[in-house]
Image (spheres, helix red, strand yellow):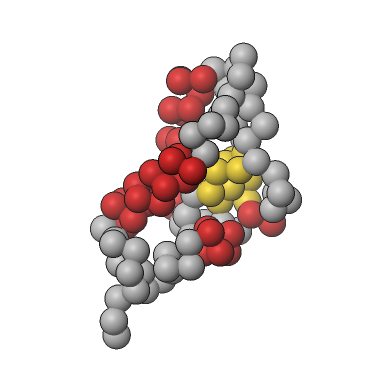
Amino acid sequence: MRLAAACLCLSWIVAEAAALPLATDGTSPYVIVLPDEATAPEETAARELQEHIERVTGATLPIRREREVDETAPQILVGRSGRATRCSPTWGPTASASGRRASG
């Protein structure tokens, strides 16, 4: 279910940013941003994303913690950070894969 939620979130972000180039000539202004207290799966996801982006574009995006990156910097959010929650308020600890809050 978490993978489905992450894919939905990533799909939304990609659709919104389709006109923005991720990398040009092997360089990118983007940073992959993890929550300050990232889980092991979030860290693995960030590394795998970094590897795939490098394969496709030739650019190696740095991986940083949320506290290390200015909010205005071009960034790709991985995991449940404060910024990710602000981007999609329905995606929180009790959100289901559909993006709706679970009752409880």
Percent x, y of residue 95? 36, 69
Residue placed most toward the observer, 54 or 38: 54
Q: Quadrant of the C terminus?
A: bottom left
Q: Pick out the residue farthest to the bottom.
A: 104
Percent x, y of residue 14? 45, 40
Residue placed most toward the observer, 103 or 19: 19
Q: Quadrant of the N terminus?
A: bottom left
Q: Tell me: 48 left or right of 96.
A: right
Q: Quadrant of residue 63?
A: top right
In this figure, what is the number of numbered marks? Answer: 0
Q: Say above or below: 63 vs 23.
A: below
Q: Quadrant of residue 81?
A: bottom right
Residue placed most toward the observer, 38 or 86: 86
Residue drawn at x 63%, y 27% as measured from the top left: 28
Q: Say above or below: 52 vs 71.
A: above
Residue drawn at x 34%, y 64% as measured from the top left: 99
Q: Tell me: 93 left or right of 96.
A: right
Q: Is residue 68 visible?
A: no
Percent x, y of residue 60? 58, 26
Residue drawn at x 58%, y 59% as measured from the top left: 83
Q: Is residue 19 visible?
A: yes
Percent x, y of residue 16? 49, 43
Q: Say above or below: 92 vs 87.
A: below
